[in-house]
Image: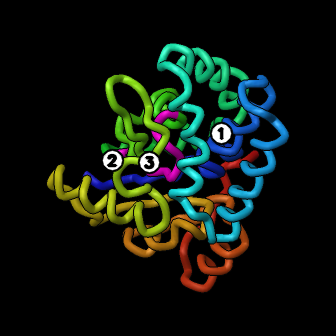
Amino acid sequence: MALALFDLDNTLLAGDSDHRWGEFICQRGIVDAARYQARNDAFYQDYQAGRLDVVAYQSFCQELLAQHDLAQLALWHQEYMRSCIEPLILPRGEALIHHHQAAGDQVLIITATNRFITGPIAKRLGVDTLLATECAMQDGRYLGQVADVPCFQGGKVIRLERWLAENGLNLEGSHFYSDSHNDLPLLERVTYPVAVDPDPTLRQTAEQRGWAVISLRD
């Protein structure tokens, strides 16, 4: 059984679920839109440039989670899934997931976006195994801070290696599909790195190294 690893944002989705969540809560008046949107956009620009302070970003975006109970958060997330995520799901991405599943591969989504946002998305895509940035919780409430190693850049390698050891698996014959140069540490570790609608930096690297470059967009 080989592993088929998928990044989520801008790979299986035609957009960024983390940034889109920020836009959603601004549009619904759940947060101060002017203040939140400016910071959300600044963090996203840092991500694209490869200079994101992931702990600072998670503290920012998880602050809201600590301010509300799970029932209210779940209601907002259901609306977010309907209005924001469903339009972003790429049919060719779903088909690629199904292709690997039909081949008997172990499919796994590995994403820097936190589990609160991405857990329902992975379930919607039919993927049971998700490695995501974890949200600290206590007594049934979010604490507003990251738990464990953030699943970002080299942190994806750390989190995946731990999961592999726990499950007695390895990366032999593995694929990893990603759009972002932030995922180069993991792309360099798998057997078959695949650049999916890549950013300019990843496209250049993929072409130089002879990696596959594909599109899942129409």
Gap in angstroms between the C-alphas marked 1 and 3: 29 Å
Measuring 78% from the left and 33% from the top, which residue is drawn there? Answer: 32
Q: Nearer the viewer, mark 1 or mark 3?
A: 3
Q: Rate crowding at label 2 as few (under 14), some (14 to 19) or many (20 or more) other CA atoms within 10 Å.
A: some
Residue that numbered label 2 is attached to: 105
Q: Secondary structure at mark 2?
A: loop
Amino acid type at mark 1 = Leu
Label 1 or label 3, whichever comes before in sequence order? 1
Residue that numbered label 3 is attached to: 146
Q: Nearer the viewer, mark 3 or mark 2?
A: 3
Asked whether 103 falls inside the magenta stretch, the response is no
Total number of numbered discs in the rendering: 3
Q: Which residues are magenta?
A: 106-116
Label 3 or label 2, whichever comes before in sequence order? 2
The quadrant in which the C terminus is found is top right
Measuring 32% from the left and 25% from the top, which residue is drawn there? Answer: 139
Q: Nearer the viewer, residue 67 or 16?
A: 67
- Rendered position, 86 above or below 115: above
Q: Rate crowding at label 1 as few (under 14), some (14 to 19) or many (20 or more) other CA atoms within 10 Å.
A: some
Gap in angstroms between the C-alphas marked 3 and 2: 30 Å
Measuring 60% from the left and 70% from the top, which residue is drawn there? Answer: 181
Label 1 or label 2, whichever comes before in sequence order? 1
Q: Position of residue 73 (x, y in %)?
A: 55, 21
On the image, which quarter does residue 19 sit in?
top right
Disc number for residue 144: none
Q: Nearer the viewer, residue 134 or 190?
A: 134
Q: Nearer the viewer, residue 172 or 60?
A: 60
Residue that numbered label 1 is attached to: 90
Q: Residue furthest bottom?
A: 208
- Rendered position, 75 above or below 104: above
Q: Position of residue 57 (x, y in %)?
A: 59, 53
